[in-house]
Image (tube, rainbow, N blue to C red):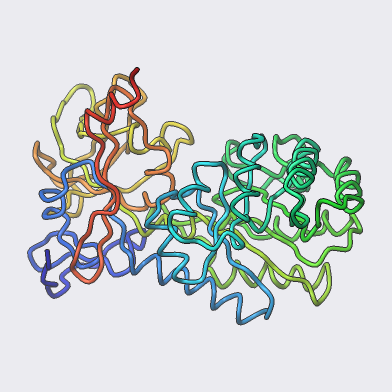
Amino acid sequence: MIRRRMPAAQQLSHVYPLGSRVNDRGVLEVGGCDLVELAREFGTPCYVVAEDDVRRRARAFMEAFAARTDDFEVVFASKAFPCTAVYRLLWEEGIGCDVAGGGELAMALAAGVDPARIHLHGNAKSLGELRAARAAGVGDVIVDNLRDIELLEALVAQDGGPPQHVSLRVAPGISPETHPAISTGGPNTKFGFDLAHAPAGIERIQASGALELGALHLHIGSQILDLEPFRAALQALAALGADVPAYNLGGGLGVAYLEHDRPPTIEEYVAMKVDAVHDIIGPGKRVLDEPGRALVANAGVTLYEVQTIKRNVETYVAVDGGMSDNLRPMLYNARYEVDVASRPGGGTRCHVVGKHCESGDILVRDADLADPRPGDILVTPATGAYGHAMANTYNGALRPPVVFASGGDARLVVRRDTYEDLLARDV
């Protein structure tokens, strides 16, 4: 369905997808599509992704790296939005991916990503996952522990193929300012080799005829707004004295969830990382980076329909979704903006809550909505990362569809679950 664009009538918060606006009918548009119309067509809850926004951010990363170094690779940290259509879109923009397990690997391969540009992560990889990666020709396995090394050596010996290219993940002992659940590079983390044990891991790989050490890897956390810890983390790796051709600096660039958030720009983030490699390690090193959230978070919004308005001590606006489609508020106390799609603005202080049997099922505390009513369509921006990824079937909820919007046209890329899907695995 083609939806004609209308002249802009109101400026939106920068947390919305690039190009979003309020049209002259007073309705929010994303990707040129009227969100109330999308809710009618695809139902609610519904994830809507501005396709052009993802492409523009992908190109911004590629251009920023190309401006500072000739030897680099941008890799999508796909746990942020593991969806075949997203893998395919970013692959079209020249961006490979990292996968955190066999399921993400299967989706990336189905999307047509070159296996040589896939990087396999995981702190507890199974033999089956490593075997699948080896069979697919995955270009890089990020070694997290000695067990990874043992299993890979056995697999290479079994198949008689060439050595497996690996990176060794190091926990540099750096904890950036972020939520503890998404801080991954501190001195006591489940990820990677700590600084005391990394030398033995490096020596073991370099002595192995089955493995080829191509890079050292670090990832200190997610939703990072202060860039300086990246330099400190790289200094810790440099102190190991390993001679490797490449450094994978993980991801971590934070995004804006609220109007007052002002994260570093992509260009500032890339400059910090590339310059740190040149300054601390020296010239001639390949630089890899794994943005995830920063590629997709602000490209996505979630649509809900208001079901009830309840005025107790405070006002509760209950919608037809909740912790089944956005777990971040419950896991990390994450904050979001929210608007009535047909009446952006405020006037009514309230809590936007979900439909699930938990008092903690609150999507947006202290929201400010314009006279919310049953039947209204609400929109929460900046849900392109970890909404679809963490969607679940709590209380028998049907996981929402994913809709791509661009140029006034919308297309379904992931359908909504059905009740038959809930029963499909019964035996």
State the quadrant of the C terminus. Answer: top left
Camera-nearest residue between 400 and 251:
400
Residue at x-position 57% and y-position 49%: 222
Q: Is residue 15 above or below residue 278?
A: above
Residue at x-position 17% and y-position 55%: 35
In the visual, does 345 lie left or right of 207? Answer: left
Q: Is residue 104 above or below residue 352?
A: below
Report which quarter residue 50 is drawn in: bottom left
Residue at x-position 26% and y-position 33%: 398
**Number of numbered discs present?**
0
Report which quarter residue 90 is drawn in: bottom left
Q: Is residue 217 above or below residue 391?
A: below
Residue at x-position 13% and y-position 59%: 27
Residue 307 x, y percent position in the rendering: 13, 32
Residue 355 x, y percent position in the rendering: 24, 27
State the quadrant of the N terminus. Answer: bottom left
Residue 116 x, y percent position in the rendering: 61, 62
Camera-nearest residue between 345 and 54:
54
Q: Is residue 353 above or below residue 114?
A: above
Residue 311 x, y percent position in the rendering: 16, 26
